Each structure stands twice: as C-alpha cells, then as structure tokens.
Amino acid sequence: MFLPGPLVYYGIINLRDDVIRLLAIAGLLGPILSGFIMTAVTEGRPGIARLLRRIVCWRVGIRWYVFALVGLPATMVLATFIRPGAAESFDISARPFFLDYLRAFISMVLLGGPLFEEPGWTGFAQPRLQRLRGPLTGGLILGSLWALWHLPGFLIPSQDVTDIPPRGTILEFVVFALALIGLRLIIVWVVNNTRNSVFMAILVHASWNTFYSAALIRLFHSPIVLGSYANLAIAGSALTLVLIAATRGRMGYREEAETVFDQAAAAP
C-alpha cells in the first residue's frame, strides 16, 4: 500500500493525492489488521482476547517505564555525541518543553505508527518467530521484515536536510534498517521481560520515534545529525550488543512462558 507513492513520484502511474493518502493509511493499518486477522484464524476468540489483554498490559514494573522513557533516549544522545562534529552543535536550550513533548508523544502513539504496528509485529509475529527460531534469530528476522516494510518510503529522495529519516539512497536505507533491527531486538528484550506486553512495545517504539523527531534533532542542530540516521543505528546496535552479551542471546526469553502461551493457544 506504500508503493503507489513512489510509483506516482517517478511517473509510472497517475493517482490523485487523496487516493495516495488513503492507500498510505491502509498500509499503516496493515500490521494491526494482519495481527488480529491471523490471531483470529489461528487461535479464535480466545486468542483475540489474549492479544487485547497484552495490548493493555501496563503493570510491568516502574523500571521498564524508566528504561523506555529515559534510558532509551539517553542511549540515543550518547550515540549522537560520539559522532564527529555532533558535540559542537549540542544546544541544551533547544530542548522541548514538557507539554510540547507530551503532545508529540501522544500524537506519535496515535498517528505515527506504534499503535498500528506493534499488535502485528509484537502481538502476533514475535512469539511465533521466537518459538521457531529462538529470540535472537527470530528478532533479527522480524527486524529485517520490519525494515523492508518501510522500503517504499526510501524510494523517494529527501527534499530537505530536515526530512526524517533521511532517504533516497541504498546506503540510507541500509543505515535505517540497522537502526530498526537494533530497535526490534530491544523491543523483543523488553516484551520478554514484561509478560509479553504489547503495551510496552508500543511505548518503546513511540519513545524512540518521538525523542528523535521532537528532541534529538533539536538538541543537535547539525547536518551530521539532521541528515543522517547513523547515530540511531549506532545507538540501536550498541545497546543490542550489550543485551545479547548480558542475556547470552536469550533476550529475556523463557521457555516456561512459551509453554503457557502454547497451552493457552491450544485451549478451546
């Protein structure tokens, strides 16, 4: 559903702007609709009920909220500081006001993707890929599929240095894909430690997107940051490597939790 935009941009097809917008909305709804449809097909009403409970599973411990809302942004800032020339552009006075950031966060959750993506990626795909391939390989596969889902958006070049994320070249997509694969593995780790909470996946996803678009590029107003996604690729990759080492590749995955999941899925 995202492909018509690039096809129109390059003159291959001709569609009205309103049609393109409708198709883009349909594409954004793809993961959540697929997640619910496939859950209904494979597990029926009990599966839908379990998925809904996971979407509202917010009682997971304050430390996971601290990680999502503070720890992850802090990692993004540190990864940006190590880029040559980024520190010189750092401007603490450019930080957004709390209410501005809160509005941006809510808008990101509702309109920016996390709410419509995670019920599919995390709610349906993650537990099944983990059972088949394990948490690390399953997370890598899921992150790669997630990145490819964004590929059509990279076929249209950036019009300005402030376009986020930068797009238009193969290298920019590769950097973006590395960042997304890292973020997906981080989400896998958080979800595995929070009773398979899709709510926490939405929160982590929204925190990443919001801090980058509403804070990071304002704090570091430099082409090195504005015109590149490399700092987030560094942040995602570095944190993922730490998690892999700390969990020995298990990413918080517990076989007994999956046994309960399988028994629940098999229940009439």
Image (spheres, rainbow, N blue to C red):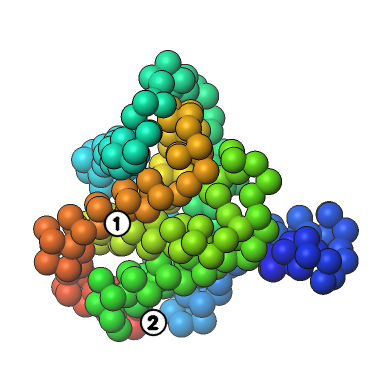
Residue 133 against residue 22 in the figure, above or below: below
> Which one is nearer the viewer's eye here, 33 or 48?
33
Q: Residue at horizontal 55%, vertical 72%?
A: 34
* Number of numbered callouts drawn: 2
**Which class describes the residues within 10 Å of circle 2: few (<14), some (14-19), or many (20+)?**
few
Task: Tell me the mark number nearer the camera, choosing from 2 and 1.
Answer: 1
- Taking the image as shown, residue 28 lies to the left or right of residue 52, namely right
Q: Residue at horizontal 38%, vertical 82%?
A: 268
Cβ atoms under marks 2 and 1 closer than 8 Å: no
> Which one is nearer the viewer's eye here, 171 or 122?
171
**Residue type indicated by callout 1:** Ser
Sequence-earlier tag: 2 or 1: 1
Residue 144 lies, in percent from the top left, at 42, 70
> Which one is nearer the viewer's eye here, 195 or 15?
15
Where is mark 2, residue-wise? 268
- The residue lying furthest to the front in this view is 84
Residue 162 can be seen, yes or no: yes
**Residue type indicated by callout 2:** Pro
Residue 212 against residue 257 in the figure, above or below: above
SS type, badge 1? helix
- Taking the image as shown, residue 84 lies to the left or right of residue 43, namely left
Quarter-wise, where is residue 167 in the image?
bottom right
Residue 237, which numbered label?
1
Q: Residue at horizontal 48%, vertical 32%?
A: 222
Residue 106 lies, in percent from the top left, at 52, 37
